[in-house]
Image (cartoon, grey):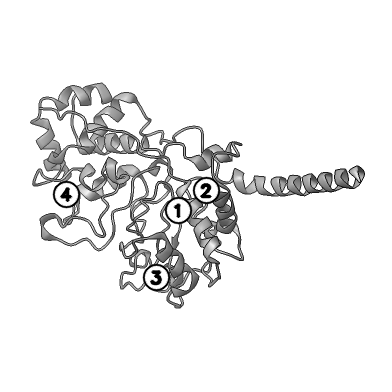
Amino acid sequence: MWFRSFILMASTLMVMGSAWSAELPAREKFKRPDSIPAPTSNPLTPEKITLGKTLFFDARLSRTGEMACATCHAPDKRWSDGRILPLQADGVKNARRTPTVLNSAWLSTLMWDGRAGTLEVQAVLPITTVHEMNFDLASLANRLNQIQGYRPLFAQAFGNDTINPERITQALASFQRTLVSNQAPFDQWINGDEQAISEEAKRGFAVFNDKNKANCAACHSSWRFTDDGFHDIGLASADLGRGTRVPAEVTLMQYAFKTPSLRDLPISGPYMHDGSMHDLKTVIRHYKSEAIQRPSLSTDMHQFELSELEESDLIAFIKSLDGGPLGIQAPAMPQ
């Protein structure tokens, strides 16, 4: 009798070992990197980061002096703004939700339609866009030159106190590169702590990766849970997204938007480029069966079935990606 029990236990352990081995490659795909990347043309330095942080929180970067980068990318809103659509600066509407700037050091394209290729280029856009800060860089440099407290910050960051548009954008980009998600329970699990996440979250991870189920990992890949690509996910929106940047003949880019990261999601939303969904069950329901079928629809989209338990497990997994707030406070403004 004991021999049969021993054989059964050994067989069970072998099956568990096989499942563990099969799961390891999937885990490895989501392992966090060890360092923050930065271009050789703008290496990270503590002084540049300090200057960039100050600029990021300074409302004087806007024409009216009322809107800072942190107005729409707020530390307590997961570096977004928590709104369905952004504030209407100068009364001009913005039809796209404010994306988070967390983990943007690894982005290969930025903005919902990918119109910026680097953080340095991206930094220009909110400052100069009419529905955001609505300023011009030359006038901004002149304004900052009149603020004596900025001179030593620029001198420490760049070797002298010259203030110009290039240095402003380099400093802003440097600070944004340091906005990296905290270690989440999922990361601890990836590193081998089996107690770090619940059994529900582990099952949700399997649903997330299963090509015959949700198949979320087709687009939400890498440790940041994005492929940095553009996909039409079948939303009822007139906004062409990436389609405004490419010829109309590029069918798959019509109505396509950049895949957002799933890390540190605000559980109450809003979600999607237009802020049209407010809970994860609604998002899952859309992917299951409600996507508009059209020629541009992503080839990774397919209708699928999930039980209530599988949906609950999937949400539990997504919650395990939350590392909590970074605890960054606004600095004192130079005078």
| Among the two numbered marks 2 and 1 on one chain, the one whose residue lies closer to the N terminus | 2
Disc sitting over residue 228 in the figure: 1
Residue behind mark 2: 222
The answer to whether the residues at label 2 and label 1 have Cβ atoms under 8 Å apart is yes
Place of residue 219 in the rendered image (x, y in percent of width and height, measured from the top left):
50, 58
Secondary structure beneath dot 2 equals: loop
Q: Is residue 274 left or right of residue 314?
A: left
Circle 3 residue = 254
Q: Amino acid at mark 1?
A: Asp
Counting from the top left corner in percent of width and height, residue 310 is at 55, 61
* Number of numbered discs visible in the structure rendering: 4
Query: What is the spatial separation of the Cα atoms under label 3 and label 1, in whole angstroms?
Result: 16 Å
Q: CA distance from mark 4 to mark 1?
A: 26 Å
Q: Nearer the viewer, residue 141 or 10?
A: 10
Mark whose residue sits in front, 2 or 1: 2
What is the C-alpha distance between the residues marked 4 and 2?
Answer: 33 Å
Determine the residue positioned at 21% across, 38% down. Answer: 165
Q: Of the residues shown, which amino acid type is indicated by label 2? A: Ser
Figure check: 95 above or below 125:
below
Rounded to the nearest angstrom, the CA distance separating label 3 from label 4 is: 28 Å
Looking at the image, is mark 4 or mark 2 nearer the viewer? 2
- Which residue type does callout 4 highlight? Met
The mark nearer the N terminus, 3 or 1, is: 1
Residue 19 x, y percent position in the rendering:
71, 49
Dot placed on the residue nearer the N-terminal end, 4 or 2: 4
Nearest to N terminus: mark 4 or mark 1: 4
The first of marks 3 and 4 along the sequence is 4
The residue beneath circle 4 is 133
Q: Element type at marker 1?
A: loop
x 17%, y 28%: residue: 332
